[in-house]
Image (spheres, helix red, strand yellow):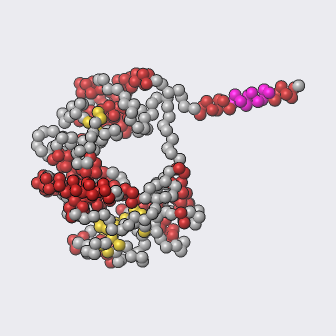
Amino acid sequence: MPGRAEGGIATRLASLLALAVIAMALPAQAASKAEVEKMFRAWIDNDLWPAAQKTGVSEKTFRAAMQGVTLNWDLPDLVPPGSRPKKEEAQSQAEFSSPGAYFSEKRLQGLAGTGSRLAKTHAATLRRIEQRFGVPGEIIVAVWGRESGFGSAKIPYSAVEVLATKAFMSTRKDMFRKELIAALHIVDGGDRTVAQLKGSWAGALGQPQFMPTSFLQYAVDFDGDGVRDIWGSVPDSLASIANYLAKKGWQAGRGWGYEVSIPAGVSCAQEGPDLAKPISAWASSGITRISGKGFPSGEAKASGMMLVPAGTHGPEFIVTPNFYVLKEYNNSDLYALFIGNLADRIAYGSGPFRGAWGDVGKMLRSDVLAMQKALVAKGYDVGKVDGLPGYKTRRSLGDWQAKSGLTPTCYPDASLKAKLR
C-alpha cells in the first residue's frame, strides 16, 4: 500500500540521517603510533625547526638535540592526531576538598625538620644570597623543600623528549613549543647538554623546578663555575629561587604575613590584593595577631591584605605583598600559605596554624558554580566562574550575606544553596 511504502522510505531516511549525525559527532579515526611518529618527524622539520631558527637556535644544536627523539606515550594529557581531548570530569561529580587537607602535618613536620638542618648546613651561602637578593633564607629553603624535597626528588625525564611530545600533541601545544625552544637555547648557551637536561613529567627543570623560559630569565651561577647548574649545585639552586622571587617583586625586610584573629564586628568580605590597607588600619579595626604579639612597629605604615581562605571556617591572616610574590611561583593561596608556614617552622620552630580548618569543601563544584552564577546575576564580581571559591567569590558571598541579613561567613556551604538563587 502506498501509505506503508512512503512510511518505510521515511523511516529509512530518518535512520540514515541519525547515523550521519552520530558519525559527525564521533572523533576521526586515530592514527597508529607508527603513523603519529612519522607525523612527529615531519613536524620537527617543517614546523619546529623554522620556529626555533627564527629565535636564534643554531642548526647544529637543533639537529643534535632532536636526533633520535621519540614521543613519550606514557605522559598525561596527550592528544594524538585524529583524537580529541578527554572531557573534564563533570563538575557535578567533583567535590572540592577542604583547604585544610592541603596542610598535612606529617609532611610539614618532615620538611621542617630537614629544612632546619639544611638551613644550618648552608647558612653561610644563604646569608650571601639574602645580602644579594633580599629574600630570607627560610623562604628559599621552604620553596626548595616544597618543589623538590631539597633536591632529593628524582627528576628522571629527558626534558627535550617531554617538551617535544607535549608541543606536538597535548592540550597546550603552543605553550610547550615555546618551552621546548627555550630548552634548546639552554643547550645552545652551554649550561647543559641534551643528555643532562632532565626534568619532571611536565618539563620543569632541576631542584627549583623551573620551566625552561624561567631558567633563561632567573637561573644564577652562584658558585662561580661558569654554568647555571640547578641540578647538581645547591648554591646555584638556592640563588636561582631567590633571584626569581626578587625579580617578581619580593620586598626585602618584610615577611609573608601573620595569622590573626578577626573580631566578629569586622567583615570577612575585605580580602584580596586590591583591598590593601596599612597594617595599622587593620590593627585599629580590632584585628590582632593570634600569637598575642603586636604587629612590628616598622610595619605600621606598610600595606597588608586580609586573607580568609576558608572564610570564617578557618585560619585568618593579614598578608604582605610578599605573599603574592610567593603565588608567582605557584598561583595558589594554599601553596603560598604552605611556604609561609614551612618557612616559619624552619626559622622559628613554630607549628601549625592555630585556627582550625572547619569541615568545609564537601559541596559539589556544580553547587558552587550555581552560587557564582547567581552572584554574577546580582551584579557581583566573583572572578573566574569555575565552581571553585577564590577570594573574589568568597568576599562577594560575604557581601551578599550581609545585605541579605545573614551573618557573613565568606564561604559557600549547603545552607546557602536554597537562599542564593
For the view shown, which residue lies furthest in the right direction? 1
Query: Quarter of the image containing the C terminus?
Result: bottom right
Q: Residue at x 87, y 26 (%)?
A: 2
In the visual, does 211 lie left or right of 118? right
The vertical placement of 219 against 389, above or below, is: above
How many marks the image carries: the answer is: 0
In the visual, does 236 lie left or right of 81? left
Please say whether residue 158 is visible from this viewpoint.
yes
In the visual, does 34 lie left or right of 278? right
Q: Position of residue 214 (x, y in %)?
A: 27, 44
Q: Residue at x 71, y 30 (%)?
A: 15
Magenta stretch contains residue 14: yes
Magenta stretch contains residue 347: no
Q: Nearer the viewer, residue 224 or 365?
A: 365
Q: Position of residue 22 (x, y in %)?
A: 63, 32
For residue 310, which quarter of the picture? bottom left
For residue 370, which quarter of the picture? bottom right
Name the chief secondary structure element in magenta: helix
Q: Residue at x 15, y 47 (%)?
A: 235
Query: Quarter of the image containing the N terminus?
Result: top right
- Span of residues in magenta: 8-17
The vertical placement of 352 against 84, above or below, is: below
Q: Nearer the viewer, residue 156 or 209?
A: 156
Q: Residue at x 34, y 29 (%)?
A: 48
Q: Position of residue 14 (x, y in %)?
A: 73, 31
Q: Position of residue 281 (x, y in %)?
A: 32, 74
Please say whether residue 378 is visible from this viewpoint.
no
